[in-house]
Image: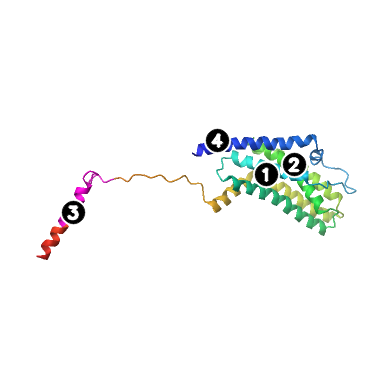
């Protein structure tokens, strides 16, 4: 039973892998903003332009959801499909919306020239590096390879966001606070998705739904050797007759 479930998970994982790969590759020919999100800017003396649309970031968030589903199913995790989908969507959208709101609040305190829409677009396109790293390292399980891509690909996308925020913030202290917070959250989120996300999800689901225990099987009871199965009714009858005789004798 469990082997059949694992095979179904492997097939679905392959489908998710193909859809995630196509979602990543096809927009490269139509939107140069994905490639631009990996190239740090050098001119920080004047405010850099930020895309004011959310179609690209939204598609990247859904792509990250598909990659997380692929990673869970290749790890032979046997849980309900609806719960798995909801957890992945909640994690990705929670990070995107939550961190964007938090950084926008810090930007307001630091007098940075950025709107909430621009912050959502900036962080959303910054997830392109996360998608590339996880898509590769979920299929090639080497920690050294992950750390290499974490520093190069994840670092490039983070540097791009940091450079844009630096160009829109005045003052070294404000720049350090705002950009350092964003860089730490963005890089740590990638570490969390690679190392801890699966374990945290399995722990939460075990708490809510109970562990995946195989169904109990009926086991026949052993009959004592001194009382064979064929003689068991006669032995019980003889014991009952002896008790009746003892009661009769005691009454006389």
Q: Is residue 203 magenta?
A: no
Query: Which residues, given as a range, are shown in magenta?
Result: 223-242
Q: What secondary structure is marked by label 1?
A: helix
Pointer 4 with pointer 3, Cβ within 8 A: no
The residue that disc 2 covers is 128
Instruction: Tell which of 204 and 43 is nearer to you.
Output: 204
Q: Is residue 241 above or below residue 17?
A: below
Q: Position of residue 134 (x, y in %)?
A: 68, 40
Q: What secondary structure is marked by label 2?
A: helix
Alpha carbon of mark 4 to alpha carbon of mark 3: how far?
58 Å
Badge 3 density bin: few <14, some 14–19, many ≥20, Cα 10 Å: few
Residue 7 - label: 4
> Given this view, does label 2 or label 1 mark the residue nearer the observer?
1
Pointer 2 with pointer 1, Cβ within 8 A: no
Image quarter where the C terminus lies is bottom left
Residue at far bottom of view: 251
Residue 239 - label: 3
Q: Position of residue 7 (x, y in %)?
A: 55, 35
The residue that disc 1 covers is 65
Check the image and tell me how it is coloured. rainbow
Residue at the (59%, 40%) spot, across then down: 73
Residue at the (77%, 44%) spot, across then down: 55
Alpha carbon of mark 4 to alpha carbon of mark 2: how far?
30 Å
């Amino acid at each position: 039973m469990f082997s059949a479930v694992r095979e179904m998970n492997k097939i679905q994982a392959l489908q998710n892998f193909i859809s995630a790969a196509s979602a990543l590759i096809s927009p490269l020919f139509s939107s140069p903003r994905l490639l631009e999100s990996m190239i740090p800017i050098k001119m920080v003396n004047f405010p850099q332009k930020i895309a004011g649309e959310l179609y690209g970031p939204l598609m990247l968030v859904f792509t990250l959801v598909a990659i997380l589903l692929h990673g869970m199913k290749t790890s032979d995790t046997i849980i309900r499909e609806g719960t798995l989908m909801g957890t992945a969507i909640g994690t990705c959208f929670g990070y995107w919306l939550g961190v964007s709101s938090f950084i926008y609040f810090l930007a307001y305190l630091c007098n940075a020239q950025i709107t909430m829409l621009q912050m959502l677009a900036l962080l959303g396109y910054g997830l392109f590096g996360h998608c590339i790293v996880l898509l590769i390292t979920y299929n090639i399980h080497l920690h050294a390879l992950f750390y290499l891509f974490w520093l190069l690909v994840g670092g490039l996308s983070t540097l791009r966001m940091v450079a844009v925020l630096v160009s829109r913030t005045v003052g070294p202290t404000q720049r350090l606070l705002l950009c350092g917070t964003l860089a730490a959250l963005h890089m740590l989120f990638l570490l969390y998705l690679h190392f801890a996300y699966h374990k945290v999800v399995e722990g939460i689901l075990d708490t809510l739904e109970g562990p995946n225990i195989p169904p109990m099987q009926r086991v026949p009871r052993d009959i004592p050797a001194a009382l064979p199965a064929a003689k068991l009714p006669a032995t019980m009858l003889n014991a009952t007759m002896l008790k009746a005789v003892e009661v009769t004798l005691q009454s006389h």
